[in-house]
């Protein structure tokens, strides 16, 4: 928003300078105009930086977690029956007593 304000101020000053036909001398001597132009360029640069999309790694991280979970299930065959029993307990198909790992 500040870039727009600075741009409006700078354009008003440039328009006045063009109307007076002393544009180059005005640019060289008008500190406020140079300051506003510099601030406008800085603000627009900052706004552009905020607008650029930053790379995220959400999909990659989700795939790594999923692959890790699948690898753990496949690598530890003793856990598979225990998890199957727990799943049936949660769904209400098994007994309420906990069963030890075998």
Image (cartoon, grey):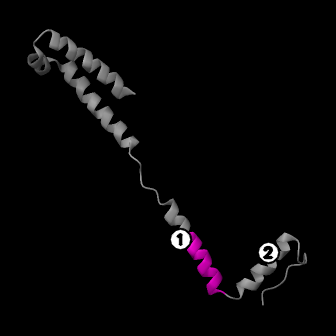
Residue 21 image offset from top left, x and y in percent: 10, 11
Q: Dot 2: within a 10 Å radius of its alpha carbon, few (fewer than 14), some, or many (20 or more) residues? A: few
Residue 20: image tag:
none
Q: Which residue is mark 1?
A: 64
Quadrant of image for the C terminus: bottom right
Q: Residue at x 31, y 23 (%)?
A: 6
How many numbered dots are placed on residues in this image? 2
Q: Is residue 93 left or right of residue 32?
A: right
Q: Marks 2 and 1: CB-CB under 8 Å?
A: no
Query: Secondary structure beneath disc 2?
Result: helix
* Residue count near mark 1 (Cα–Cα under 10 Å), binned few <14, some 14–19, many ≥20: few
Residue 87 image-quadrant placement: bottom right
How far apart are the alpha carbons under marks 2 and 1?
24 Å
Residue 87 is marked as 2
- Give the residue drawn at x 14%, y 20%: 27
Span shown in magenta: 64-76
Magenta segment main secondary structure: helix
Q: Residue at x 84, y 70 (%)?
A: 91
In the rendered image of this protein, does residue 5 appear above or below residue 77?
above
Q: Is residue 50 above or below residue 61?
A: above
**x and y, in percent, of residue 60 in the image:** 49, 65
> Residue 39 colored magenta?
no
- What x and y, as percent, mark residue 99? 84, 83
Q: Give the structural element (helix, strand or loop) at label 1.
A: helix
Q: Is residue 63 left or right of residue 48?
A: right
**Rendered location of residue 29, percent (x, y):** 12, 18
In the picture as drawn, the residue positioned furthest to the top comes out as 20
Residue lying at the far bottom of the rendered structure: 102
Question: Which of the 4 image quadrants contains residue 95?
Answer: bottom right
In this rendering, would 100 be left or right of 68?
Answer: right
Considering only order in the chain, which callout, 1 or 2, is on the residue closer to the N terminus? Answer: 1
Relative vertical location of residue 38 with respect to residue 60 in this rendering, above or below = above
């Amino acid at each position: 928003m500040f870039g727009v304000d600075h741009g409006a101020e700078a354009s008003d000053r440039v328009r006045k300078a063009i109307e007076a036909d002393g544009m180059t001398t005005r640019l060289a001597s008008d500190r406020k105009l140079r300051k506003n132009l510099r601030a406008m360029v800085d603000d627009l640069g900052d706004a552009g930086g905020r607008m650029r999309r930053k790379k995220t790694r959400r999909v990659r991280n989700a795939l790594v977690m999923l692959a890790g979970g699948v690898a753990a299930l496949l690598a530890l065959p003793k856990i598979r029956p225990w998890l199957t029993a727990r799943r049936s307990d949660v769904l209400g198909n098994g007994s309420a007593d906990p069963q030890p790992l075998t």
